[in-house]
Amino acid sequence: MNGHLTEDELDALLCGDDLAGERADHLQECLVCRRRRDGFLAAIEDAAADDPEVPTRDRVRRAALAQWSGRNPVARRWWLAAAAAVLLAVVLPFAVQRAPAPAAVDTDAVLRQVDEVLARDPLAVMASDDVLETVVPAQAATSPGGSAS
């Protein structure tokens, strides 16, 4: 296999695995691959250097636990419950919206209008003008006998 080390080969190398014969030789001879490896190693070392020393971490952890244990968790829960109740009492009336009453409909007037439309032209209610023209041509509709002679 020719060419530079693949990402998988670099990952394996960084995890402590050894490269196969010719790939290890390539790493020794190739400046690009060595720089990629060294760049990854430098990033790992920089990230590890950001961690505080063990005694510092222990001191911070002890101080945080002492601060936390000094509080009364029951009192804290009581305040949270009281705050939630007040918030609920204030917000709930605004959140619940009453539906408007339906408008009164005069059903007799609606039925009279429907009857009037159907009395004038019952087909126009069910079909568009172009369908009516196809089914009942205007000439046939206006002739007295209903058929064009």
Image (cartoon, grey):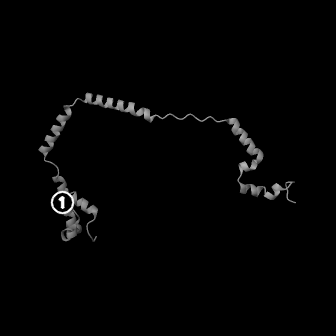
Q: Which amino acid does label 1 sit on?
A: Ala
Residue 130 drawn above or below residue 57: below
> In this rendering, would 147 be left or right of 58?
right
Disc tally is 1
Q: Which residue is painted at 36% across and 33% down in the image?
A: 87
For this orientation, the residue located farthest to the left is 55
Res 147 quadrant in image: bottom right
> In this rendering, would 32 be left or right of 120?
left
The residue tagged 1 is 42
Q: In which quarter of the image is the C terminus?
A: bottom right
Q: Position of residue 54 (x, y in %)?
A: 13, 45
Q: Quadrant of the N terminus?
A: bottom left
Q: Position of residue 47 (x, y in %)?
A: 19, 54
Crowd band around label 1 with a 10 angstrom C-alpha radius: few (<14), some (14–19), many (20+) = few
Q: Position of residue 5 (x, y in %)?
A: 26, 66
Q: Which residue is painted at 72% across and 48% down in the image?
A: 125
Given residues 38 and 21, the one toward you in this image is 38
> In this rendering, would 82 be left or right of 27?
right
